[in-house]
């Protein structure tokens, strides 16, 4: 007999699974829109397709994102494997690094038309080094707390001199609704002399 030899050859391409991670830079101050998401894609088969959920600042089909406000984002990356590619979705959180907050204690004016009101403020979540700018019409002050105030709305803008963040608040000093009215009901003479 003759021995028959059979052989079979097949080429198989092995690929690592598609993996996705993100490096995040937080938004430094509320409203600065400077958060950044940088994606790291490994495995799968290049080229990759990127689709971000629509959100403020997002460029829907870009790999990396910049100029973002703090918030929750999501991206789906699909590789080029046939027939329909492999997809991985990654949720990404861009945090807010410095969230300045104002707290105030207000002393209202005691008598209608008086000027003994006061506002005492505390700034939270900042560096401790602040610039203060109070305004109300022609009134202006640059101290942390303000006193000897008439009734009305006072606007305060605080700037953190280290982080560069600003926060604004409006505080209302109240007064009694009307001047105290005194009426004389009757007069009785004193007959003791």
Image (cartoon, grey):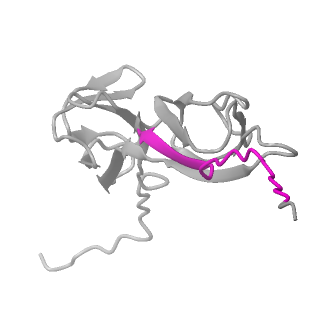
* Residue 8 locus on image (x, y percent): 81, 52
From this viewpoint, which residue is outermost toward the front? 1
Main secondary structure along the magenta-highlighted residues: loop
Residue farthest along the left direction in this orientation:
193
Quadrant for the N terminus, please: bottom right
- Counting from the top left corner in percent of width and height, residue 78 is at 73, 42
Residue 112 position in % (x across, y down): 39, 49
Q: Which quarter shows the C terminus?
A: bottom left
Residue found at x 21% / y 41%: 145
**Magenta segment, which residues?**
4-26
164 with respect to 43 (left or right) = left
Q: Is residue 190 left or right of residue 183?
A: left
**Residue 110 visible in the picture:** no
In this rendering, the answer to whether 2 lies above or below 42 is: below
State the residue at coordinates (65%, 48%).
14
When asked about the image quadrant of residue 62, the answer is: top right
In this view, 14 is above or below 163: below
Instruction: From the viewer's side, name the closer residue of 65 and 13.
Output: 13
Residue 187 lies in the magenta stretch: no
- Between 45 and 89, the one nearer to me in the picture: 45
Residue 108 visible in the picture: yes
- Residue 171 location, quadrant: top left
Name the foreground residue: 114 vs 40: 40
Q: Is residue 97 left or right of residue 10?
A: left
């Amino acid at each position: 007999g003759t021995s028959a030899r059979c052989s079979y050859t097949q080429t198989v391409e092995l690929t690592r699974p598609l993996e996705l991670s993100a490096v995040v830079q937080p938004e430094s101050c509320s409203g600065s829109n400077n958060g950044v998401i940088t994606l790291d894609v490994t495995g799968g088969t290049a080229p990759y397709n990127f689709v971000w959920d629509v959100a403020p600042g997002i460029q829907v089909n870009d790999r990396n994102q910049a100029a973002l406000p703090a918030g929750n984002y999501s991206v789906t990356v699909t590789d080029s494997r046939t027939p329909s590619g492999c997809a991985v979705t990654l949720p990404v959180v861009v945090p807010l690094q410095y969230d300045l907050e104002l707290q105030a204690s207000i002393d209202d004016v005691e008598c209608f038309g008086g000027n003994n009101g006061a506002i005492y403020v505390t700034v939270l979540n900042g560096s401790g080094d602040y610039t203060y700018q109070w305004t109300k019409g022609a009134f202006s002050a640059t101290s942390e707390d303000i006193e000897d105030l008439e009734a009305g709305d006072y606007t305060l803008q605080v700037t953190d001199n280290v982080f560069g963040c600003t926060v604004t608040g409006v505080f209302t000093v109240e007064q009694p609704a009307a001047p105290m009215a005194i009426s004389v009901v009757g007069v009785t003479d004193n007959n003791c002399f």
